[in-house]
Image (spheres, helix red, strand yellow):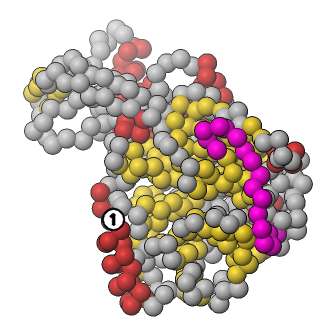
Amino acid sequence: GATSRARCRPWRALDSPTPTASTPPQPTRGSALVGPPPPLRPAQQATVGPCNVPKPRAWNPVEQSKWASWHGLGSMPSAEAMRLFVKILEEEDPGWYSRVPEFNSEPIVDIQMHKPKEEPQIVPASTNGTSISEPKIISENGSSVETQDIDVILEGLSTVSSLDEWTPLAISGHRPKPRYEHGATVLQDKMYIFGGNHNGCYLSDLQALDLKNLTWSKIDAKLEAESSDSAKTSQIAPCAGHSLFFSIAGHTKDPSEGVTVKEFDPHTCTWSIVRTYGKSPVSRGGQTVTLVGTTLVLFGGEDAKRCLLNDLHILDLETMTWDDVDAIGTPPPRSDHAAACHADRYLLIFGGGSHATCFNDLHVLDLQTMEWSRPKQQGLTPSPRAGHAGATVGENWYIVGGGNNKSGVSDTLVLNMSTLTWSVVSTAEGRVPLASEGMTLVHSNYNGYDYLISFGGYNGRYSNEVYTLSLKSDFKSTTKEETVSDLGSSNQRLKW
């Protein structure tokens, strides 16, 4: 998959060789940060908050320097301080993450509690299962207030308190190798990632992040006896399906003639190649595979000869039969686009790229009439992008990352699929993992709250960072009755 989008990568030099299975990409290095405060003080700002301690004695220059660095951050929010802390670590020691298993200190996570002014604030001192039972003295409006004894247990994604603001998660366990163009899904409070690309080498490992204790673990997956050896190196993008998840297609070093379908059973930790019927789609990468009811809908991508595709195929999961669909008004060929399903009837395609350009168009397929359309949209006009990631939460479709011909795309967008209205959720600053291509984005409903979780990507540097976005109530899932009602009105208004 790395060879197909080199022209869509603004952070790679134009004369750099495109990566292959044996040739690593040549990223363009960015400028270093200038004059950041020492790493210790952003850590204090992130975990404790603004500096309220008195200035140390003049004869202690070391403590004075620490105090000045912390005090100089002013009222910087804890999440911003955490991002600054991570940036400083990355610039000063790019390989710090590779030594995480040897680092035994407690990870630092922004868990600021948002409460009304009149209520005392309780600030946890650690994460991933934090219990607080002692009174705390909090300075509030110039006076000291003693809180009551209280037990507060925070674990997993519950430690993230900032709404509509991406937060890096502090993860324990051995981190997966940095990568992009991998696959990801969430099943039973775990995020699974599979395969990917690192320095032009295809990966075949399966990793799981436990969303309860925020710990990575490598899955020692087995292959059934009848599975071929080639399945061990298949680079394919998984998609969720009932109690199993499937991996469909993807670029490999030695591509097969047709698409291979594999399924993974998390209970037995076993991969198996699924026998399918009908005419299989041609082998490809950069496609989308979308779950619609009891079917998987495959669209577009790029074959092994770098030919862009815009064909449509549907796999019936009950009969495991492929159907080659001739739809009306098919969009132009593309790869690295995003796709979503709405109301088990509409397939939405956004963005993607050809060999020379990136798109910002939205196409909608009515799966009952098999007709494509380009409906009128409302709100802002998204910028062109390819290699972005998407995830749906109710009737909202979130789009993160990607690249275009000028820069990495830093905004997080949301499309209300009933009204086709675009909005900006947040915007990242600088060359951060969220402004990357080939990252993955998944949705998790944890303890009744909706979270988006991103992993990996490439923006001149391969990433294995995990970020999460806690969604506020008005972006959370609507009921089925509301969704169907809105869809009916939008059908009349927008004429899908």
Q: Position of residue 31 (x, y in %)?
A: 63, 46
**In the image: residue 388, left or right of residue 155:** right
Instruction: Give the residue displayed 88% in from the left and 65% down from the top.
Output: 257
Quadrant housing residue 220: top right
Instruction: Give the residue displayed 42% in from the left and 28% down from the top.
Output: 128
| Amino acid type, residue under disc 1 in the picture | Thr
- Prevalent SS, magenta region: loop
Given residues 3 and 140, the one toward you in this image is 3
Q: Give yes or no for residue 342 being in the magenta stretch.
A: no
Q: Looking at the image, is 350 positioned above or below residue 141?
A: below
Instruction: Give the residue displayed 36% in from the left and 61% down from the top.
Output: 477
Instruction: Give the residue displayed 33% in from the left and 65% down from the top.
Output: 478
Q: Position of residue 91 (x, y in %)?
A: 60, 36
- Asked whether the viewer can see residue 480, the reply is yes
**Part of the protein shown in magenta:** 265-283
Q: Secondary structure at mark 1?
A: loop
- Asked whether the viewer can see residue 353, the reply is no
**In the image: residue 262, left or right of residue 399:** right
Q: Looking at the image, is 52 positioned above or below residue 486?
A: above
Instruction: Farthest residue to the top: give it.
Output: 59
Q: Quadrant of the N terminus?
A: bottom right
Quadrant housing residue 82: top left
Give the total number of marks visible in the rendering: 1
Q: Looking at the image, is 364 positioned above or below residue 385?
A: below
Within 10 angstroms of label 1, few (less than 14), some, or many (20 or more) residues?
Answer: some
Q: Position of residue 485 (x, y in %)?
A: 33, 78
**In the image: residue 179, left or right of residue 477:** right
Q: Which residue is mark 1?
A: 478
